[in-house]
Amino acid sequence: MSPLYNITPFTLLDFPDCTACILWFAGCNMRCQYCYNPEIVLGKGNFGYDRALNFLKKRRGLLDGVVLSGGECTLHKGLEDFAADVKLMGYRLKIDTNGSRPKVLKRLVDQSLVDYVALDLKAMPKHFKTITNSNLFKEFEQSLELLLHAGIGFEVRTTVHSSLIDREHLEQMGQYLQDAGYRGNFYVQHFVNGSQTLRPLPYSGKIDIARLNLPGVNLIFRG
């Protein structure tokens, strides 16, 4: 199966301090109810690594970095070789991941093929299966532990849908990260109401963030 679904040719928002493009990988091993990329998660890839590399050759000197997103990029065979080719072109590489493939992430880190990681914290264990339709929280924990000692930049982020995650749940996430030793930015983005999702969900508005109690965590809201 072809790994790539689409390319966003330019972004200033998705890779800190980099002009970048986004390569969207098809498929995912989670089925998050609020996911607003159902066409990518459920769809098939439209093209392979060669086409992406040809695109990147034309963008040398115009872009600083490449974001591998999805879907879940770490599911695809050949990712390490592809990442090595991207790095040989002089690009910085960022990976957006749900943390479910810590062994793949470790190989990328050990080979110095990734410069920055955005790690999605979907939910705490009590709610993880309900929200993601998977049993992959332990794998997420392994990825978090790896990144805490990897010596590369990374962030943790969460999408909040008011029907699935309330203020107490979000505070538990912050406490979990603090207890794990994470001292970076915890980015929280509200679900964008009106987006097509994997499963229709009632929406009761944004949660009240003004009184969140997250000591020791650098909480940053997006949107």
Image (tube, grey):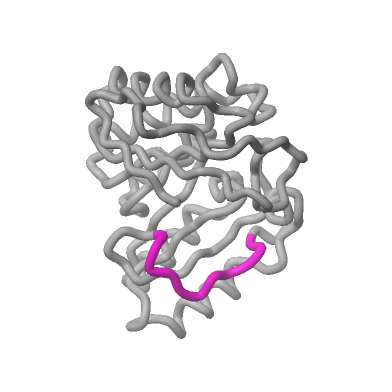
- Height in image: 177 above or below 204? above
- Height in image: 13 above or below 98? below
Horizontal arrangement in the rendering, residue 193 relative to residue 110 (left or right): right
Give the residue drawn at x 39%, y 63%.
Answer: 13
- Height in image: 191 above or below 78? above
Viewer-proximal residue among 40 and 213: 213
Please give the range of residues in magenta: 4-14
Tell me which corner region of the image, top left, top right, bottom left or bottom right, holds residue 88. bottom left
Viewer-proximal residue among 32 and 70: 32
Tell me which corner region of the image, top left, top right, bottom left or bottom right, holds residue 49. bottom right
Give the residue drawn at x 63%, y 30%.
Answer: 163
Viewer-proximal residue among 76 and 81: 76
Q: Is residue 75 visible?
A: yes
How many marks overall? 0
Give the residue drawn at x 58%, y 60%.
Answer: 24
Q: Is residue 31 visible?
A: no
Tell me which corner region of the image, top left, top right, bottom left or bottom right, holds residue 221. top left
Where residue 133 sits in the image (x, y, percent)? 69, 28
Question: Could you tell me what secondary structure mostly forms the magenta stretch?
Answer: strand
Where residue 215 sits in the image (x, y, percent)? 25, 23
Give the residue drawn at x 33%, y 83%.
Answer: 61
- Height in image: 40 above or below 119? below
